[in-house]
Amino acid sequence: MIKALKKAVLPVAGLGTRFLPATKSLAKEMLPVVDKPLIQYAVEEARAAGIEQFCLITGRGKTALVEHFDIAYELERTLQERNKEAEIAMLRAVAVPPGAIMTVRQQVPHGLGHAIWCARAFIGDEPFAVMLPDDLVLSDTPCLKQLADVYYETGGNVLAVTEVPREHSHRYGILKIGSDDGRMVEVTGLVEKPKPADAPSNLSIIGRYVLLPQVLEHLARMERGAGGEVQLTDGMARMIGNTPFHGLRYEGRRFDCGDKLGFLEAQIAFALKRPDMAEPVRAFLRHYAELE
Ligand code: G1P
């Protein structure tokens, strides 16, 4: 029997060093794209995929993330006094039902695999999604919903994958693939951040996963991989052959918002999707393009 996918784990303990000084006292997941923080995009995408329970893997200085999904009584009251009904409705939509978010501290930065292992009590014996909020996906169907559909078809692990230039393979988890129907690929191997010459394909993992809880048994061994860290990719690789494992070339465009250029591009792409902003944004883009 295929168990329902109701849980998501969001690792948010990273220091955001690529975004200093902005991230000196601000969690990088609170950086806004247009007017919404990255973490909110991830939570909304998850809820659209049927996720009901969230576990944030946090660290020091990340309390704003939890505050963001709470009810802000004082703010709502002030808005009410000013008859700002639309803003109140917007805030209400951000809050999640009571008890839907819990946090776990990672305490020590031992890698993504270690971060996920920290959520083991939350995950229990159920399938779960992993979402890296730095990876923002602009798509018609929310990216995690696309993965969830494949999970319900196959009952196994599913990764969101995309082609990358071979010289970028050292930035990603890379797939070794078996059968490939152009949309879904069978995963026969996984390597974390290989050198271009060692990359088994040019298909990379992006920050959306649906995983079976068995991965925890492998992560629990705390074997160190690339960069001396406990890698989620290595834990996943150990499940290959025992459970169905697929990569999905998702529909949509992914922006690496942990990177300055990727973040800037996301601002523009998301603003151009907003009816109230598209026209003026196009106008100023033309203006700056002509200045070249
Ligand atoms: C992590 C994963 C990697 C994946 C990437 C996607 O790497 O370890 O396999 O391809 O996220 O963004 P990180 O970006 O944390 O170094």
Image: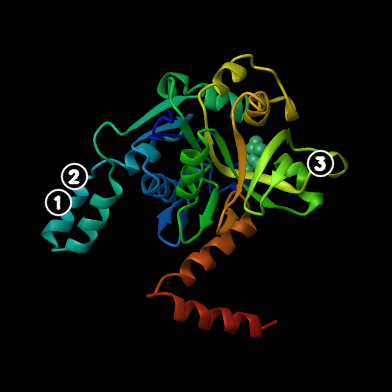
Q: Residues within 10 Å of mark 3 (few under 14, many from 20)?
A: many
Q: Which amino acid does label 2 sit on?
A: Tyr
Name the residue tied to disc 3: 199
Which element carries disc 2, helix, strand or loop? helix
Q: Position of residue 127 (x, y in %)?
A: 46, 29
Q: Nearer the viewer, residue 172 or 241?
A: 241
- Whereabouts is ligand 1, in terms of quadrant? top right
Cα distance in 3D space between marks 1 and 2: 6 Å
**36 lies left or right of 290:** left
Picture residue at 53% right of the left edge, 68% below the top: 268
Picture residue at 18% right of the left edge, 57% below the top: 79
Name the residue tied to disc 1: 77
Q: Position of residue 39 (x, y in %)?
A: 44, 46
Q: In which quarter of the image is the C terminus?
A: bottom right
Work out whether mark 1 precedes mark 3 in sequence or the reverse, and give the earlier one.
1
Tell me if residue 14 can be seen.
no
1 and 2 marks in contact (CB < 8 Å): yes
| Disc 2 CB within 8 Å of nearest ligand 1 atom | no
Q: Where is residue 89 in the image (x, y as percent from the top left)?
A: 21, 57
Work out whether mark 2 precedes mark 3 in sequence or the reverse, and give the earlier one.
2
Q: Which amino acid does label 3 sit on?
A: Ala
Identify the residue at the far right of this view. Answer: 197
267 is higher (above) or lower (below) than 147: below
1 and 3 marks in contact (CB < 8 Å): no
Name the residue tied to disc 2: 73
